[in-house]
Amino acid sequence: MIFNLDNAEPGLPSSVAFSIPVVIKNIIIHRCIINEGASTCIMSTLVKWRLGSPELTPSTITFRAYDGFLSQPEGLYQNVPIELEGKMVLIDIEVVDAPLDYNILLGRSYMYAMKAVSSLVFRTMMFPHAGKEE
């Protein structure tokens, strides 16, 4: 399946976020950023509250921002059922209590679980669905 991210117009500048809407527990979450370079997935506490404040397990990871600032996540939300265009995968997401420009950052673990390939240039993502690679 080929999914056109953002339904964006071709030729948008590279500064525009590469985002998609996903569904978690029948709730549509907008402003989910695809970042294949991110080693983990991150969710804001606002989204966690919107999902009914699911139970978190302690996290051992420490984040280091580009400016060197260190922060500890609130916890790990495990086996989160994330759905995109009818395909569901389960991933773990670190929950942070910090101001974010996005609701969820979907990193390598998400792309690996989806078996997806994305193109920033064409703002598309391709992944197998229902046993087919279209």
Image (spheres, rainbow, N blue to C red):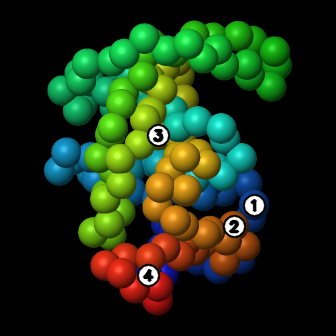
Question: Eyeballing the image, is 75 above or below 29?
Answer: above
Check whether the beta carbons of the residues at disc 3 and disc 1 lie within 8 A of each other. Answer: no
Q: Earlier in the sequence, mark 1 or mark 4?
A: 4
Amino acid at dot 1? Ser
Amino acid at dot 2? Leu
Q: Earlier in the sequence, mark 2 or mark 4?
A: 4
Circle 2 or circle 1, nearest the eye:
2
Question: Eyeballing the image, is 44 above or below 69?
Answer: below
View extreme (right): residue: 67
At which x and y percent is residue 69? 75, 12
Check whether the beta carbons of the residues at disc 2 and disc 1 lie within 8 A of each other. Answer: yes
In the image, is 86 to the left or to the right of 116? Answer: left
Amino acid at dot 3? Ile
SS for dot 1? loop
SS for dot 3? strand
Q: Residue at x 55, y 56 (%)?
A: 112
Check whether the beta carbons of the residues at disc 3 and disc 2 lie within 8 A of each other. Answer: no
Q: Residue at x 29, y 46 (%)?
A: 81
Q: Residue at x 66, y 52 (%)?
A: 36
What distance separates the C-alpha of mark 3 from that of mark 1? 19 Å
View extreme (front): residue: 131
Q: Which residue is mark 4?
A: 1
SS for dot 2? loop
Q: Which residue is mark 1?
A: 14
Amino acid at dot 4? Met
Report which quarter residue 56 is drawn in: top left
What distance separates the C-alpha of mark 2 from that of mark 1? 8 Å
Q: Which residue is mark 2?
A: 120
